[in-house]
Structures are given as structure tokens and as C-alpha cells.
Image: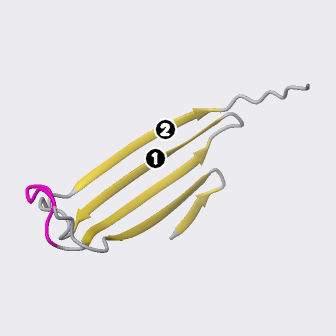
Amino acid sequence: FGYSPLKWMKGRLTCYRMGAYHPFAANPAAFGNGTTRGNMYQARTDFKLRKYWSGHVVYERLAPGSFHANPDKAWFLRFEVIFHIEKSHEF
């Protein structure tokens, strides 16, 4: 799902359904006996404030499935600001 509430701002919401072809036969403390890796939900907003300034904010939430032995949810948050330098070189 994408949206653009302002001319200088764009956003999107994404859901990733992750799976595995077969269970991973390794350390049972880390891996479960299922094939569902889980669902990851992502919200991202990109912005361009001026000619040289842009950035984005990303939030991700992971709900692990039966592939993992530990069902604890996880999250990730990142803020990034970018300064663009434009200079052309002639050879």
C-alpha cells in the first residue's frame, strides 16, 4: 500500500510472508520444527526537504513463525538523512 500525503513525502506499508521449504535440522535451541519463518510488517516514509536534502524513516516488526524456536517478536527502526552533492566532471 502506498501513499503520498504531501508533494515532498511518500510512504508505503508492506507485509512480507516468509517461509522455508523444510525445517532446519540444527540446534533445537534456535530452530523449531516448522516451515513458517514468520511475517514482517514494514512502514517506510521517504521525504525530500530541499534540493540537496532527503531521507527516510523505516520501521519493521517481525512476528516469527514455527521455523524459530524462540517466538519473541522483534522490531527495527532507522532514521536516515542524506545530503546530495552534485558535480559533473568532464573528461
First to last magenta residue range = 26-33
Amino acid type at image mark 1: Val
Label 2 secondary element: strand
Q: Is residue 24 left or right of residue 5?
A: left
Q: Tell me, yes or no, whether the two marked residues, 2 and 1, touch with CB atoms within 8 Å.
A: yes
Q: Is residue 77 left or right of residue 12?
A: left
Q: Residue 80: which disc?
A: 2
Residue 52 included in the magenta stretch of the image = no
Label 1 secondary element: strand
Q: Is residue 53 left or right of residue 64?
A: right
Q: CA distance from mark 2 to mark 1?
A: 6 Å
* Residue at horizontal 64 percent and vertical 50 percent from the top: 8
**Closer-to-camera residue (76/23):** 23
Q: Position of residue 54 (x, y in %)?
A: 60, 40
Q: Position of residue 79 (x, y in %)?
A: 44, 40
The image quadrant that residue 14 belongs to is bottom left
Disc 1: which residue: 57
Residue 30 included in the magenta stretch of the image = yes
Q: Position of residue 30 (x, y in %)?
A: 14, 56
The image quadrant that residue 51 belongs to is top right
Above/below status of 65 relative to 78: below
Q: Residue 35: which disc?
A: none
**Closer-to-camera residue (32/75):** 32
* Residue at horizontal 17 percent and vertical 70 percent from the top: 66
Question: Which badge, 2 or 1, is on the more N-terminal residue?
Answer: 1
